[in-house]
Structures are given as C-alpha cells and as structure tokens.
Amino acid sequence: MKKRFFLCVMLMLSSLGLWAQSDSVQMAAPVRTWNVRSAIEVESLVPMFMTGGFHIGIGYRLDKFRVRLSVINGGSYDAEKAGINNSSSDFKRFYKTSPGLFFGYNVWRNLELYSYLELHTFEIEQRSTGVRKNLFSTDTGLGLSYQFFIGNIFYIQPGLHLYLRKRNSIDFETARYIIPGADFSPVLRLGARLWSKSK
C-alpha cells in the first residue's frame, strides 16, 4: 500500500513539473535551468520527515557535473522492504544518522546519472523479541533522477536508487541477520537552487 502511495505521489508530482514547464514554454521563452555554468543547490528527501526522520543535502554543480553531500536519518522507515535479495520478514532495518557523498553527471538536460558512497549505520530489530542492534554498512550504487524546475529556483526531483553492499551479518540470541546485498528504492527530493551562474 505504501509503495503504491509513493508511486502515485511521484507520478502526480512529475506530471505537475512537466505541466509547469510546458506551461512556461507557451507563456514565455523557456527557462533553460540545465544550461548553467555553476550552481549551489539544497534539497531534502521529504518522505523521511513523514517517518520521524530527516534528510538534508547540499550540492555544487559545475557545468554538467554535480557533487553533493547529505545526511540522512530514516526515523521509523523500514528499509528492509527495499531489499531485492535475501530480505528478511523476521527483521526490521532502520536508517540511523548517516552521511553520504554523491557524484553525478547530467546526461541530458536535467536528467542526472550519479553514483554515491554512503556510510550507513542501520539499527536492526528482531521482530519476535524487539531487540535492536547496530550494523554498519558501506553502501554504493547508481541513481537516476530528473530535476523538474518550477520557475528558476524550486525543483522536484523523483528518481530511482540501486544500493549495493557487502552482505554483513549480526547475531541475535535466536537468529542471525544478514543484510541484503542490494536495495532498490524510489526517491523523491524537493530542492532549491540558491545561486547560479549562467554560461
């Protein structure tokens, strides 16, 4: 149910962004938000706030390249459901406060392909006992997303992430938890371009 909800939200917001851009084309000359020499942007993975967590990222764009630093805390969001191999129904997995470094390239207009290195600390909960233990994981992978600008400042950036990691494990009294080697997750970020310099 949650997956369908977030998918619907992403589709609606994407449509809103496309409508806003197409409307601006009809009313005036198109704003070429991708055609900048450099820019500073801040953004947030908004759904994290809905689960009692937070996310903040700040990025610097130089021509088609983009570097971004971020910090995430997932609150009560269960990331175990995103696992695409060896996901366990006996455990929950929560993001504790963790940093990340992202490096991207605009392959076409505002379509960004990027890789990342995230130093995640997960809190693993055994459902049957409620016992929680921390598990550290160095995650990398690929992401693909598009910045739909509303005007020149604010943007909506839906995307897809594939996380890859070593399958670390942690022992509980009655079972062993093995973290999935890969997660696949849709993401939705809201952001603002604080400063930019045109080409």
Image (tube, grey):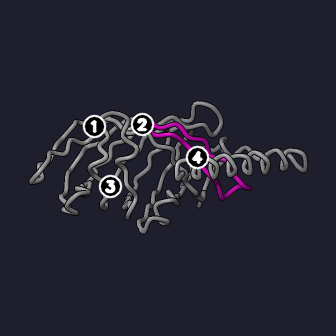
Q: Nearer the viewer, residue 164 or 197?
A: 164
Q: Nearer the viewer, mark 2 or mark 3?
A: 2
Secondary structure of residue under mark 1: loop
- Disc 3 and disc 1 in contact, CB within 8 angstroms: no
Secondary structure of residue under mark 3: strand
Q: Earlier in the sequence, mark 4 or mark 3?
A: 3
Percent of width and height locating residue 34: 65, 42
Q: Which mark is residue 165?
A: 1
Amino acid carrying mark 2 in the image: Leu
For disc 4, the marked residue is 158
Q: Earlier in the sequence, mark 1 or mark 4?
A: 4
Q: Earlier in the sequence, mark 2 or mark 3?
A: 3
Amino acid carrying mark 3 in the image: Pro
- Disc 4 and disc 3 in contact, CB within 8 angstroms: no
Left or right of 129 in this view: 154: right
Q: Nearer the viewer, residue 174 or 189?
A: 174
* Residue count near mark 1 (Cα–Cα under 10 Å), binned few <14, some 14–19, many ≥20: some
The Cα atoms of the two marked residues, 4 and 2, are separated by: 14 Å
For disc 2, the marked residue is 162
Question: What is the span of residues highlighted in magenta in the rendered image?
Answer: 143-162
Which quadrant holds the C terminus?
Answer: top right
Q: Which mark is residue 99?
A: 3
Q: Nearer the viewer, residue 101 or 29?
A: 101
The Cα atoms of the two marked residues, 2 and 3, are separated by: 17 Å
Residue 106 found in image quarter:
top right
Report the magenta stretch's main SS: strand
* Residue count near mark 3 (Cα–Cα under 10 Å), binned few <14, some 14–19, many ≥20: some
Percent of width and height locating residue 123: 25, 58
- Disc 4 and disc 2 in contact, CB within 8 angstroms: no
Q: Nearer the viewer, mark 3 or mark 1?
A: 1
